[in-house]
Image (cartoon, helix red, strand yellow):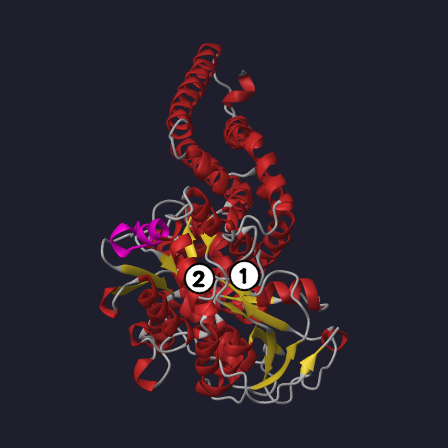
Amino acid sequence: MWPRLPPRAREEGSRAALIAAGSTIIVVGLILWIILTSEAWPAVQKQFFSWFHFKESFPDVLRGFWLDVKMFIVAEILILSFALVLAMIRSLRGPAFFPLRAIVVTYIDIIRGIPMLLLILLLGFGVPALQLQGVPTSRLFWGVAALVISYSAYTAEVYRAGIESVHESQRMSARSIGLTQVQALRFVIVPQAIRNVIPALLNGFVSLQKDVALVFVLGVREGLREADIYNARTFNYTSYVVAAVLFLLISVPVARFTDWYTERDRRRRQAMST
Amino acid sequence: MEWANTTWGKVVIGLVAVLAVVLVVVALTGGDDEDSAADTTAAPEETTTTAAPEETTTTAAPEETTTTEAVQACAVENLPLASAGTLTVATGEPVFPPWMGVGDDFFDVPESGTGYEGALVYALAAEMGFSDDQVVFVRTGFDEAIAPGPKDWDFNIQQYSITATRAEVVDFSDPYYTTKQSLVALPGSPVIGATTLADLADTRLGAAIGTTSFDFIEEVIQPNEPASVYDDNVDAIAALVAGQLDGILVDLPTAYFMTAVQIPEQGAEGVIVAQFAIEAAGADDYGMLFAKGNELVPCVNEALGVLAGGGTLQALEDEWLAQGGDVATITE
């Protein structure tokens, strides 16, 4: 799985790792020292990094965070599928598809310009207030719907960048062997396109994971809101640190995975081209 | 060290480093916090500002000079003001009747001196020796008011409930108003006609964040579905109109404003279902909020005491927080 390095290089590698670890400890230590010896630190520490409040707020924030994770997973699956459909429609050629393309372009332009918060409020409070028969009033439903609608517009553009990065000859070859436009996209272009934009998609993951918390305006008690409640009650900010730690536990591994994947992909391509 | 060269090895090292930093910070905070934990449980009401006025009187040693010294300490020119010569009063944005800015022309105009808190600020300022044009209003958010560090205002007044936990971080004046919780709903809501807490067990209730109303749902009513929480009452009303809530908990004066103005503005009709004849677990006392250690507190309390003793507070309450009407009660 890992390219075998000659012994010499491996030795140098581990030396480099040691140096990196050493300099990290020095830099982090220095920053910590400056902060921890400052005069106002005890007050700040009590309000932001209190072990007592950490323990007190943890169960509630964790329960709310679990809701974030569930909303995130549902939203992400819908976003990835819906955005791909949008991007494929936008990539269709020919005058016959003009109305479809125009609708998608308008959608993407408008949705990307609307603040997420407005979209959530509009769908979460506005639509249920219409009291239409058969339309759900659940704030979770509309909160996630708003996230999907908004993020799909951004994600569709990521896909489109991927689709456009596939060389034109691929499309032409696909068409020349008798595939329709949609078939060419589906079987030839899109698989290559997705591979090109996976780092950008994963970047969207990390971003969505935090934006999920915005549905709290609808009264949903997710992780950040539980931290909010604790803070409003006690005037102590440690609960936000709890939320941050939980969010980091997800976003850091995703970020590392993105780097690892990008690197692996780069190496494979190099291997192929040589 | 070979494993350290693999990508996953680096990931592990990175995570361990992050964890180590968190642990260091936590470990450094550990010692003090046992104390603060003890404070929270052991020091209930003393931590509020009631102790402060006594200090000023006791520190002024000889008995004859007590009054003059106290008067001098609280003379406008001697007050530790955020901005010399003016009383800088912070409040929310926007401010809502019946607390501040009452009347069509005065909505969100605290300088109008209308509303219970608006009128109180000017009465208090006059009692302390300020003229009306020496009173300046500034606007703050909730978080800004409670963040550590110096403040550029003297006190903040926006229906802050006095609690022991909050008093660890900020100082409060003596209470200037004590409220009862009440329940607001739309006609046809399942909460209509409720007379006991048990009647509310299966209803969906909500309140604004940071209010004792919210704590009242969580700790006293304890419905099966946890309380929903909103940034402010406007959002809570939106949820009510959207059919996502059966009722909103607010203090009674706010309930009057909600049903008279806010809910009709959102195109619906609201009713005050009942008020709660139950002492809240937390406090329902509103106090002015000061930065921790502000020496202005005893002077404000002194003026507040004069207003309360002279019947001014009651008169303001009668004028702005009309308790009229026959609101039903909910008991345990």
Q: Looking at the image, which is closer to me, A134 or B213? A: B213
Residue at point 47%, 15% (across, down): A14
Q: Would residue B77 be counted in the magenta stretch?
A: yes
The amino acid beneath tag 2 is Tyr
Q: Residues within 10 Å of mark 1 (few under 14, many from 20)?
A: many
Compared to residue B19, the image places residue A141 above or below, namely: below
User: Would you say B14 lies left or right of A74 here?
Assistant: left
Q: Earlier in the sequence, mark 1 or mark 2?
A: 1
Image location of residue A105, percent across then percent down? 34, 70
Give the secondary structure at mark 1. Answer: helix
Compared to residue B279, the image places residue B171 above or below, namely: above
**Residue A93 visible in this rendered orientation of the protein:** no
Give the secondary structure at mark 2. Answer: helix
Badge 1: chain ID = A
Region of the chain picked out in magenta, as a range: B68-80
Q: Residues within 10 Å of mark 2 (few under 14, many from 20)?
A: many
**Viewport quadrant of the C terminus of chain B:** bottom right
**Distance of label 1 from label 2 (alpha carbons):** 9 Å
Residue at point 52%, 39% (across, down): A253
Image location of residue B253, percent across then percent down? 51, 78
Checking the image for residue A151, the label placed there is 2
Badge 2: chain ID = A
Image location of residue A87, percent across then percent down? 41, 63
**Viewport quadrant of the N terminus of chain B:** top right
Magenta region's main secondary structure? Answer: helix
Q: Which residue is mark 1?
A: A75
Q: Are marks 1 and 2 in contact (CB under 8 Å)?
A: yes
Q: Would residue B294 be counted in the magenta stretch?
A: no
